Amino acid sequence: MSSSTEPLCEHQLAPWNPERDDPYFTLDAQVAAIDMALTEEAAGRSLSRAIVDHADELVGRST
């Protein structure tokens, strides 16, 4: 079990994360995913949020 200050290891999250091919991690694929999330939110079909750190740097997203 991890504490609130200990980062989660990739293997701890594996049961909930889908397997991703290498192209998923490219800038083009991430831009496309963001575009799709914005389109879905504008249509009222989803709610997307950015996750930022203490310096307001983007570190993730939630959809």
Image (spheres, rainbow, N blue to C red):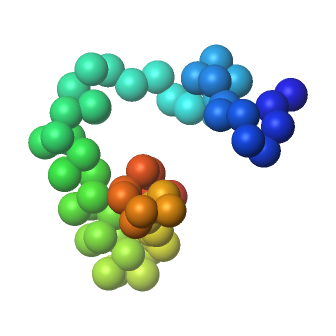
Q: Residue lying furthest front in this view?
A: 55
Q: Quadrant of residue 34?
A: bottom left
Q: Position of residue 26 (x, y in %)?
A: 19, 33
- Residue at image location 56% in from the left, 32% down from the top: 17
> Would residue 19 be seen by someone viewing this image from the given angle?
yes
Seen in the picture, residue 44 relative to 55 is either above or below; the reply is below
> Would residue 15 be seen by someone viewing this image from the given angle?
no
Side (left or right) of 35 relative to 62: left
Q: Position of residue 29 (x, y in %)?
A: 20, 41
Q: Position of residue 22 (x, y in %)?
A: 27, 20
- Residue at image location 81% in from the left, 31% down from the top: 2
Side (left or right) of 27 relative to 46: left
The front one of 49 and 21 is 49
Side (left or right) of 42 relative to 31: right
Q: Residue lying furthest right in this view?
A: 1
Q: Residue lying furthest left in this view?
A: 28
Seen in the picture, residue 17 relative to 42 is either above or below; the reply is above
The front one of 60 and 45 is 60
- Residue at image location 17% in from the left, 40% down from the top: 27
